[in-house]
Amino acid sequence: MNSKIDGSKIDRFWEARSRQSAVEAARFHPEFTSYDLALIEPHLIGGASVLDLGCGTCALANAIAARETVHVHAVDKYPGMLDFADKRSNLSTEVADAVGYGGDRRFDVILLFGVINSIPDADDRMQMYRTLREMLRQGGKLIVKSQFGIAEEVLVDAYSQDLGMDYAAVYPRVDDEEERLKRLFSVSRIDPYPAEYNRWSNTHFYAFLCVKH
């Protein structure tokens, strides 16, 4: 199923966010960061190479790079987001779109946190998963965290009072996205947040730990 969401609306939203201050452009849910790091850290074996694809303001990339034995490559489509990256020798940045991203580099861990909500075409997401699998070393892990529809895909295309601007996104049906990932990986579904963080009855935040075998 390919969602009937205008991708240009999603682009306009994130481009505008990238031109704001660090506080205003930051992750929608900064209170999630400690839980996200707890999810990621068991996989950061010394010397690990990490790709943070669609890194936003580098909140996770900066925190991970504080572990000096890990190298993080942070990638975002919007250059302004990368202005918030810490200046560290083990943190590199690149301007690129998650859709169509690829290359010869190989990683131990790839993070895709909150990214798929901005990719309305399910075929694009599936192709991205295939490419990222190729970019993982054997035994490497792709961690996909997102807000998902529970019973069905949920589309949002409206003015957000919380954000003070128009917002468009797709929340894929969780079972459908898990099935896509299982075509390529061994997959575990994780429910990483306290119940009160899931404020809406028709969506839920999940993470998928996807292992390349």
Image: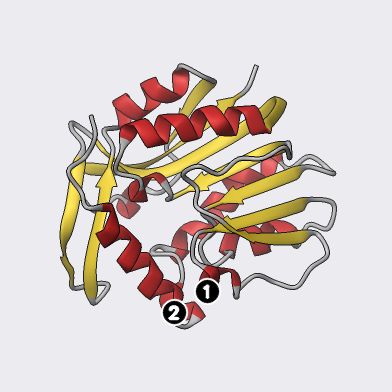
- Say which residue appears at 51% left-offset and 62% top-offset: 56
Pinpoint residue 58: horizontal percent, then vertical percent.
Answer: 59, 64
Q: Which residue is mark 1?
A: 80
- Say which residue appears at 42% left-offset and 50% top-offset: 114
Task: Indicate the secondary structure of the residue bearing disc 1.
Answer: helix
- Say which residue appears at 70% left-offset and 46% top-offset: 50
Q: Which residue is mark 2?
A: 19
Task: Indicate the secondary structure of the residue bearing disc 2.
Answer: loop
| Label 1 environment density (alpha carbons within 10 Å; few <14, some 14–19, many ≥20) | many
The reply to whether dot 1 and dot 2 touch (C-beta < 8 Å) is yes
Amino acid, disc 2 = Arg
Q: Is residue 89 above or below residue 143?
A: below
Viewer-proximal residue among 139 and 101: 101
Q: Quadrant of residue 162?
A: bottom left
Viewer-proximal residue among 72 and 8: 8
Instruction: Determine whether, in the image, residue 133 is placed left or right of residue 177.
Output: right
Tell me which numbered mark, 1 or 2, is placed earlier along the sequence: 2
Q: Is residue 181 above or below residue 117?
A: above
